[in-house]
Image (cartoon, rainbow, N blue to C red):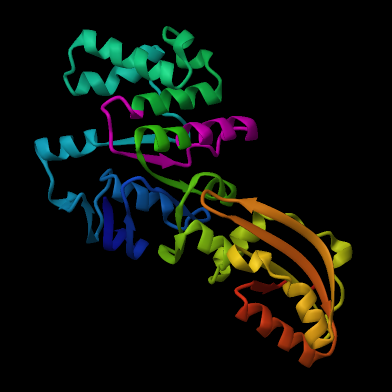
Amino acid sequence: MIEAIGVSKTFKSTQALRDISLKVEKGDVYGIIGMSGAGKSTLIRCLSRLIPPSAGKILFQGTDIGSLSGQALRHFHMKTGMIFQHFNLLSSRTVLGNVAYPLEIANIPKEKQESRVKELLHFVGLDSKIDCYPNALSGGEKQRVGIARALANHPEVLFSDESTSALDPKTTQEILDLLKTLNKKLGLTIVLITHDMEVIKKICNKTAVIEGGRIVEEGQVARIFGDPQHPTTQRFIQSSAHEIPLEFIQAPSPNRKLLRLRFKGKAAAEPVISQIVKKFHVEANILLGWIDHLQTVSIGTLVIDLTGSPEGIEAALRFLTEHNVHCEAIEYAS
């Protein structure tokens, strides 16, 4: 549905995006994650044609959106909706007026506008707020109005620009649940940016990790969580995992390793820990364990303290890797 091919973006002397390529299929909830300044906001603005790229091209249903102008560009913007971190509601308009605004721009007759607004407010659970002004709404309610407004013209793609980062955890979960409902019930394709791996884990089926204006890792969320390859991806996943108590972190030694092991699929059903203990004469002390429930699969994680001879430890690590267990050494504190 959306494809970026070799997209770069330069602002004066600053290169914000560098040779970005990605593909979003119809029905995806595609998350783009990165730290502040990584380029994710610039990327979503290019994908939505709010700003043009400096190089490369972006295809929407096979059409290069950089070539669009006039009526064709307006038609593209009607096919897409955008929700923002800080809501971007018009303070002088009621909820009805805010949601109706894109319908007015599209020259939809007045009676049809009101009918569509009521339908959308019912869908997002704000029937009773139709005559309220934004300053009378909570943050979650403002974002629901923003979502209703983004849906006004029946878009095929919804872009979400850090839409939950200004909300408390409970409200964040409610908005994420609403986005999941939009994806499943309406078949809406969603492209979102975030700095929070929990958001990716809860609603996305695909993700791209961006750093320094480049995509450093991309793919199915289950694969990214189960076997992260890039150090930046590993740091994001660690930040969303259970914190390891300091008392577990001991001085480095060739005879011990603190490991984070991730299991999915068949690996989760095999007794690999007991096997390495028997085969390689090592001891495995399980310190922590938890399960991350993703959209399509659950990923099991164990933190273990592995002790034994250096040769036994290395052989055990090779065995685990061969049995599709992702092994990640946890750095000891100095």
Residue 186 falls in image quadrant? top left
Please, which residue is most extreme toward the bottom here? 311
Q: Which residue is drawn at the image coordinates 86% and 66% (left, top)?
A: 248
Q: Which residue is drawn at the image coordinates 72% and 74% (left, top)?
A: 272
Up-down relation of residue 161 to residue 149 (above or below): below
Estimate the x, y position of residue 166 in percent, counting from the top left: 56, 35
Is residue 334 visible in the rendered image? The answer is: no
Is residue 58 visible in the rendered image? The answer is: yes
Left or right: 255, with 330 as reference point: right
Up-down relation of residue 160 to residue 120 (above or below): below
Estimate the x, y position of residue 38 in percent, counting from the top left: 46, 58
Left or right: 247, with 82 as reference point: right
Estimate the x, y position of residue 105 in percent, counting from the top left: 20, 23
Along the viewing direction, whichever of 291 and 139 lies nearer the viewer: 291
Up-down relation of residue 326 to residue 204 (above or below): below
Asked whether residue 160 is drawn in magenta, I would say: yes
Range of the magenta residues?
A: 150-179
Estimate the x, y position of residue 148 in percent, counting from the top left: 38, 24
Q: Which residue is drawn at the image coordinates 37% and 51% (left, top)?
A: 42
